[in-house]
Amino acid sequence: MKYLDKVIRNWRTQVSGRYVRERDSVLDIGCFDGYLFRKFEQKKLTNCIGVDPLLDEDIHTENYQLLKGNFPDALPADKKFDTITMLVVLEHIPRSQQNNLSEEFYGRLNDKGRVIITVPSPAVDKILDVLMTLKLIDGMSLDEHFGFHPNEVIDLFQEDQFTLLSREKFQFGLNNLFVFEKVS
């Protein structure tokens, strides 16, 4: 991972981290190397799990575990969380699999649980192509972008199950943050 990749990741994690509460149990979908858990150690997160199909193997630490695989298949069936994060992951999921996310999230969240999602704006793909050509970033799985537009995020969450707490743009308008809360 190049320096600019790390700067962008850190910025995205900082913005989304404002909505992760102290002592939350967190599921990080697309966790990569567990950076989010290390970044928020001061929040004393509990029972955290990350899932990512790109992991070489499962990783178990004192504070979190990273599981090789996809959501929800890689998780223990009865495991629930206070927060589910999905940072720059949704655009990598085929549309046919996106339709079930609301139900899956609802079933995996405790009362008042949150879903925190970031989705890049459509212009980002062209910018990333240029940055990769200039060898300023490595980029990850860009071939998996399925033309997803940030405006589609809200439609994925059923109003009787989730309330939109926040929607904001950041990174010069090139990234979008969505925070939903489970309706109990």
Image: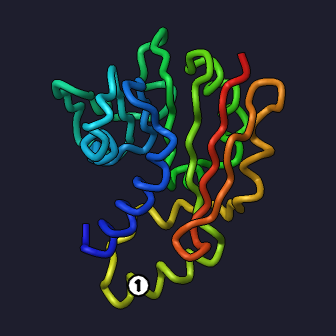
- Which quadrant, please, contains the N terminus? bottom left
Q: Residue furthest bottom?
A: 134
Q: Position of residue 20 (x, y in %)?
A: 46, 37
User: Residue at image x 26%, y 28%?
Assistant: 64
Q: Which kind of residue does numbered mark 1 sit on?
A: Leu
- Tell me where residue 108 sits by quadrant: top right
- Which residue does the numbered mark 1 point to in the structure image? 131
- Which quadrant, please, contains the C terminus? top right
User: Residue at image x 59%, y 58%?
Assistant: 119
Q: Residue furthest top?
A: 78
Q: Position of residue 40 (x, y in %)?
A: 31, 41
User: Residue at image x 52%, y 51%?
Assistant: 89
Total label count? 1
| Neighbourhood count class around disc 1 (C-alpha, 10 Å): few under 14, some 14–19, many 20 upward | some
Q: Residue furthest left?
A: 62
Observer-nearest residue: 22 or 94? 22
- Tell me where residue 98 sits by quadrant: top right
User: Residue at image x 68%, y 53%?
Assistant: 167
Q: Secondary structure at mark 1?
A: helix
Colour convention of the picture: rainbow
Observer-nearest residue: 90 or 170? 170
Is residue 106 placed above or below 15 in the rendered structure?
A: above
Q: Position of residue 15 (x, y in %)?
A: 48, 55
Is residue 71 placed above or below 153 in the rendered structure?
A: above
Q: Position of residue 106 (x, y in %)?
A: 65, 22
Is residue 8 placed above or below 181 in the rendered structure?
A: below
